Amino acid sequence: MKTLIATALIMASSASYGHDNSFSSESCNLDLNGGININAQEITFSKDKTPLYSITENDTLLINGENIALTAHQESLLRDYSTHIRNLVPEVRSIALDAIDLAIDGVNLAFNELLGEGNQASAELTSQLTTIRGEVDAEFTQHENFYIDEEGFSGKDFFDENFEQRIESAVESTIKNALGSLMIAVGQEMLFSGGDMDAFESKMENFGELIEHEMKTRSAGLEKRGEALCRSIIVIDKMEEQLKESIDEIANFDLITASAKHSIANAKLM
């Protein structure tokens, strides 16, 4: 039963963050070897918390606080690079929030089918997931800086193994609290099946397949958006390579490596 409910959550999100400093999704593998801090005025790239260089006002390059003289062409490359990086942030936020919304829908679909509309288990888990959603949203919108490095977003546990464990714990506690209601529901289903365990197991398997199919269908749009995000990173990589070829001062900086899946070309970001 726990696996059945958890499936709704797992199917909702295609991205994960591991302790090997890498993100993995259906479309990309991203390895972070440094940090990126974005605010209204500048983007700062760092290694081991030490700033390497910054882009201010989208077209000014600073290294160790020193303004690097650029040609008009180099400023244009820098501006395009900075703008594309900034454009990634709202899309990452949108995909993350929509994935959690999808998980909430899946939870309600599963519990409502088992326990009926308006059940306490669904309300409890939905409340916990909604709280997590609010925290993720706040991380993107209520802070002046957006920061990500090897440890995750702003040094928090969003999208890492602790984040996954937090969701699993929410599922486990909800299942435990709803155990009585679930046992009654199971008993009723067995009665409706005339005590036939094979018929009951078949019905539950069909129900699990229905949930999985429904969540796969609903998550298809998120997967496409994830692939589009991957393509955006590849575009940024091409811009970055042009910058490295054009500006000697940043030629050796390489903070993030991206590998594309599903026939999307391999790429490096920064």
Image (cartoon, rainbow, N blue to C red):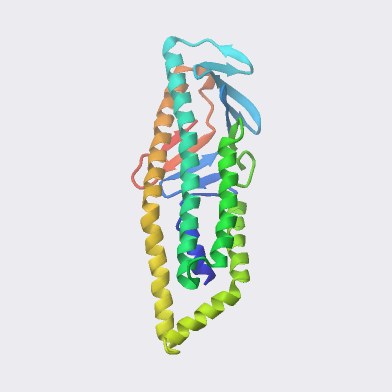
Residue 91 position by quadrant: top left
Image location (x, y in percent) of residue 61: 54, 17
Image location (x, y in percent) of residue 180: 60, 77
Q: Is residue 219 above or below residue 180?
A: above
Residue 175 position by quadrant: bottom right
Residue furthest to the bottom: 195
Looking at the image, residue 13 sits to the left or right of residue 62; the answer is left
Q: Is residue 194 above or below residue 55?
A: below
Residue 245 in view of the camera: no
Residue 84 position by quadrant: top left
Looking at the image, residue 9 sits to the left or right of residue 67; the answer is left
Q: Nearer the viewer, residue 99 or 142?
A: 142
Q: Is residue 69 above or below residue 269?
A: above
The residue depicted at 62 percent of the width and 47 percent of the height is 157
The residue depicted at 48 percent of the width and 51 percent of the height is 101
Image location (x, y in percent) of residue 126: 55, 58
Q: Nearer the viewer, residue 25 or 121?
A: 121
Image location (x, y in percent) of residue 117: 48, 67
Residue 188 in view of the camera: yes
The residue depicted at 55 percent of the width and 39 percent of the height is 32
Q: How many marks?
A: 0
